[in-house]
Image (tube, helix red, strand yellow):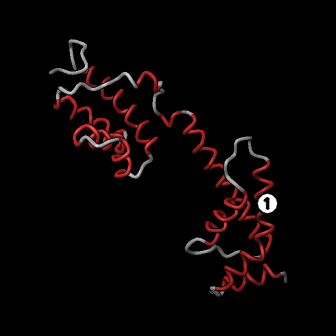
Amino acid sequence: MSDVTRILEDLRKGDQRAADELLAAVYQELRRLASGKIARERPGQTLQATALVHEAYLRLLGDEPAQWENRGHFFAAAAEAMRRILVEAARRKARLKRGGGHQRQELDEADFVELPASVDLIALDEALEKLSQQDHIKAELVKLRFFTGLTAEQAGQILGISRATADRYWKFARAWLFHEIGKGNDSGEACST
């Protein structure tokens, strides 16, 4: 019986120290597996082998670890966990790369989109409700910036987002609201006084 198989048996029996022993016993081999999997990924992969090993290990031992029969069974499960993590990361990256379902708006164009100070508050409220259904954070950012006069940095701190993200969200939300409010006016103006 290998050390790993013995440790897995101890883990099944509920030995709390077995999880630490298991990591020490399999870490280098898991790291080698992770490095091999990452090497086969497309260039630009940002996940590191160490992070992949730790994430896979946490998933494997989770709240209730699976009952692995032997060393081979454990490593097969570890390889599957790593595969899933890499696929999830690739999907996340692809979603972000393709705009996450949002229409692309050039930021330099969005810089010129301003909501007038004398905006129709009813139209703005209706548009904010629609925006909130699509993206709650962006709607909250507009409320903080437009109605309380907070800066992008202050609003970002309240929402738990970086200033750069707050700036990006603000530009998107202004353009979106300008368009949405403009759809409601027959005259083609963005807002009424």
Q: Quarter of the image holding residue 62? A: bottom right
Residue at 38 percent across and 47 percent down: it is: 156
Q: Which of 154 and 69 is in front in this view?
A: 154
Label 1 belongs to which residue? Answer: 33
Residue at 40 percent across and 25 percent down: it is: 111
Q: What residue type is labelled 1?
A: Leu
Q: In this view, does 100 lie above or below 18?
A: above
Does any portion of residue 48 appear in the rendered image? yes
Q: Is residue 50 above or below residue 135?
A: below
Q: Which of 185 and 15 is in front in this view?
A: 185
Q: In this view, does 180 lie above or below 96?
A: above
Residue at 60 percent across and 44 percent down: it is: 91
Find residue 20 and report its horizontal and vertical position in percent.
Answer: 68, 80
Q: What element carries label 1?
A: helix
Q: Split into 4 quadrants, where in the image is the N terminus?
A: bottom right
Find residue 71 and report its horizontal and vertical position in percent.
Answer: 79, 74
Q: Farthest residue to the top: give it.
A: 187
At label 1, counting other C-alpha atoms closer than 10 Å, the crowd grade (few under 14, some 14-19, many 20 or more) is some
Q: Which of 101 and 177 is in front in this view?
A: 177
Q: In this view, does 26 lie above or below 3?
A: above
Find residue 136 and report its horizontal and vertical position in percent.
Answer: 34, 44
Q: Quarter of the image holding residue 105? A: top left
Residue at 78 percent across and 80 percent down: it is: 5
